[in-house]
């Protein structure tokens, strides 16, 4: 019995290693699929990639009007505050939305030829990452226009925060893309879930507003894995005065991101395992 368990564990590890190696060996296909998805998204579009810039600008205008002019928010430099969290949220939500339908949307090639199908949702994450960097130009422009200086010491948080989002988005996209083939309600449920998730994340309101209500149990708000990422971007780029973000050291920000990254890597491992179990029937179920 013990020998069977050891054999099973070894086979599981070998399957996971093979999956990662297969994806890496098909990295050129991944790059091409990412490029194709970007081209298809703006096919026959006059403005093309300019729409990537207009999206955060439209959000900026609407939310600034509502929260600054109507609700009279007290957050200083609200435009910078909003963009700091909104851009990273757009990356995450766009990755999940497009990744969920990646396999069904490419049913024609999934049925005809074999390749590691994990690259399809990963290509969606890659395309969303490119959009993120394009939209970041709007944030940089806003920093220049408002002459707002970021927190240069906290800039070091951004690479780790971005890595966390990429890992979480990849795990979610891989899992949802496979489940969506079997249960088509997934893509509809995701839209509702992301809407609720957005308002549970301190993007249009400051984190301390929630933490003060929770009192000593403010760690509950940190159960949202996107919250530490948004806080890191707000700390580095918005750098508000005391009272709007957690009054902790940069090391605590790094620690929170490291914890979420560890959880994200476990979820990514689990998503690859799940995808391998469902992979053999994907072509028949589409």
Image (cartoon, rainbow, N blue to C red):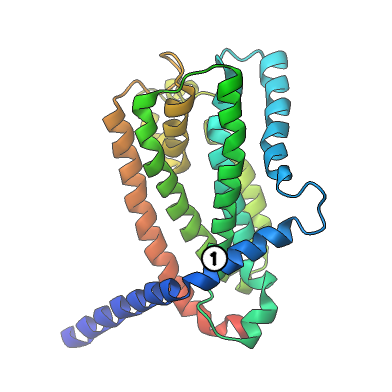
Above or below residue 231? Residue 146 is above
Q: Residue at x 61, y 74 (%)?
A: 182
The answer to which of 83 and 272 lies nearer the viewer is 83
SS type, badge 1: helix
- Where does the N terminus fall, quadrant-wise? bottom left
Q: Residue at x 48, y 75 (%)?
A: 26
Above or below residue 123? Residue 23 is below
> Residue beneath label 1, please?
31
- Where does the C terminus fall, quadrant-wise? bottom right
Query: As drawn, is 114 to the left or to the right of 15?
Result: right
Can see residue 286? no
Can see residue 39? yes
The answer to which of 28 and 96 lies nearer the viewer is 28
Quadrant of the image occupied by residue 99? bottom right
Instruction: Mark 1: give few (<14), some (14-19) or many (20+) Cα within 10 Å.
Output: some
Q: Residue 139: where, in percent of width, then height?
A: 58, 31
Quadrant of the image occupied by residue 211? top left
Q: Residue 70: where, in percent of width, then height?
A: 72, 15
Query: As drawn, is 186 to the left or to the right of 256?
Result: right
Q: Residue 282: where, in percent of width, then height?
A: 58, 80
Q: Residue at x 17, y 84 (%)?
A: 2
Q: Residue 270: where, in percent of width, then height?
A: 40, 66
> Number of callouts in the render?
1
Above or below residue 95? Residue 229 is above
């Amino acid at each position: 019995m013990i020998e069977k368990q050891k054999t099973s564990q070894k086979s599981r590890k070998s399957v996971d290693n093979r999956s990662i190696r297969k994806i890496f060996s098909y990295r050129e296909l991944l790059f091409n699929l990412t490029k194709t998805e970007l081209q298809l998204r703006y096919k026959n579009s006059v403005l093309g990639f300019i729409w990537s810039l207009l999206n955060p600008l439209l959000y900026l205008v609407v939310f600034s009007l509502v929260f600054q002019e109507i609700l009279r928010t007290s957050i200083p430099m609200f435009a910078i505050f909003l963009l700091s969290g909104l851009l990273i949220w757009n990356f995450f939500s766009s990755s999940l939305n497009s990744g969920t339908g990646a396999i069904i949307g490419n049913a024609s090639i999934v049925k005809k030829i074999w390749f590691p199908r994990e690259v399809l949702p990963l290509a969606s994450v890659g395309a969303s990452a490119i959009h993120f960097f394009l939209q970041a130009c709007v944030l940089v422009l806003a920093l220049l226009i408002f002459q707002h200086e970021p927190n240069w010491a906290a800039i070091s948080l951004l690479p780790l925060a971005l890595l966390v989002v990429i890992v979480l988005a990849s795990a979610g996209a891989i899992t949802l893309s496979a489940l969506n083939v079997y249960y088509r309600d997934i893509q509809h449920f995701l839209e509702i879930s992301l809407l609720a998730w957005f308002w549970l994340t301190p993007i249009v309101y400051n984190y301390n507003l929630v933490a003060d209500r929770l009192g000593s149990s403010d760690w509950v708000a940190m159960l949202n894995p996107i919250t530490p990422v948004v806080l890191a971007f707000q700390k580095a780029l918005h750098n508000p005065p005391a009272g709007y973000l957690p009054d902790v050291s940069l090391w605590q920000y790094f620690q929170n991101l490291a914890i979420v990254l560890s959880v994200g890597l476990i979820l990514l491992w689990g998503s690859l395992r799940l995808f391998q179990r469902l992979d053999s029937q994907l072509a028949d179920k589409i």
